[in-house]
Amino acid sequence: REVEKVNAEKGWQLGIHVDAASGGFIAPFQEMSGKGCPPFDFRLPNVITMSASGHKFGESICGTGWIVFRQREDLAEHIAVTVTYLGGSSDSLTLNFSRPASGPYVQFYKLLRLGKEGYKQKVENQMSVAAYIRHFISNLVHEPSGKKRFQLLDGGDTCCLPVVSARLNPEIGLHYNDIDMQHALSESHWHVSGYRLGFENPSTAEFEDLFTDVDQCETMFRVVVKSNLTRSLAEDLTAKLVQVLDFLDEMDGGYESVRSKFNGQKAAREMEKIETDNVPIAMKSSLTVGDK
């Protein structure tokens, strides 16, 4: 509406590009399930292009992406290049004309194999698993304080991605953060991405606040629910999460992973070996005799 208003006032022809990277393969199928998601596509008059990533929730291989134009006139000449190839003319819409065909082939197969109904069922299952994880962690309580373990940060169970975003409740004052929890979970072969709520400014190379109401040292985590994360696997993840939280609560001195301890011991052994190798031969022989 705002774009329409500006175009009418200024006599401009501003258009909108919708970067539906992940949501492009989620939102349409939620709408098919009757979730009532707001329109975001070519039903809006000023949307002229849309893009989506087939390798995220489209079930294709890495590097598969799409861009769709409302009409040919919106395609700039320097993007669409007509070339003579194999005795005929062909429009090339890629950046360098020659690109691997594996991505489109896999995506086309998945579109034919699953169809609209298959993608709808897949998305329903992903949203259901995400809702299970979300509700599970929202009900976890830190017994000593009586407060909830986590603060939820995502958009809820409908009209959003199958992604659970949260952070450890800062009101509890724990001696570990979400990144510590990520490392501890990884030792159970679960990778849950942890992030600091700050960013490195490319202009100044300084680490700055990402939000005005949260310090850059604060952290969060997210769980991306793809189609291979089944309900039974999600139950294993939540069980491991509870074990990890209990484990971290008991470590009053702070978290140190088993892997870090192992690497530290390994480094110490290697250092000892280097120091031994640098001992003069005569001294090394006397040490050996003395040891015997």
Image: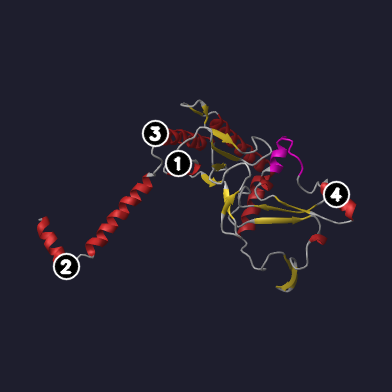
As measured in the structure, the alpha-carbon distance from the residue carrying label 2 to the one carrying label 4 is 85 Å
Image-based side of 9 in relation to 68, left or right: right
Whole-percent x, y for residue 42 in the image: 79, 49
Which residue is at a point 64% across and 40% down the rendered structure image? 123
Marks 3 and 1: which is nearer the front? 3
Residue range in magenta is 27-39
Whole-percent x, y for residue 98 in the image: 64, 68
Q: Is residue 202 above or below residue 154?
A: below
Whole-percent x, y for residue 24 in the image: 69, 48
The residue wearing badge 2 is 281
* Mark 1, secondary structure of its residue: helix
User: Residue 4: which numbered mark, if any?
Assistant: 4
Task: Return the disc, 3 or 1, that comes first in the chain's sequence.
Answer: 1
* Mark 2, secondary structure of its residue: helix
Marks 2 and 4: which is nearer the front? 2
Which residue is at a point 57% across and 31% down the rendered structure image? 135
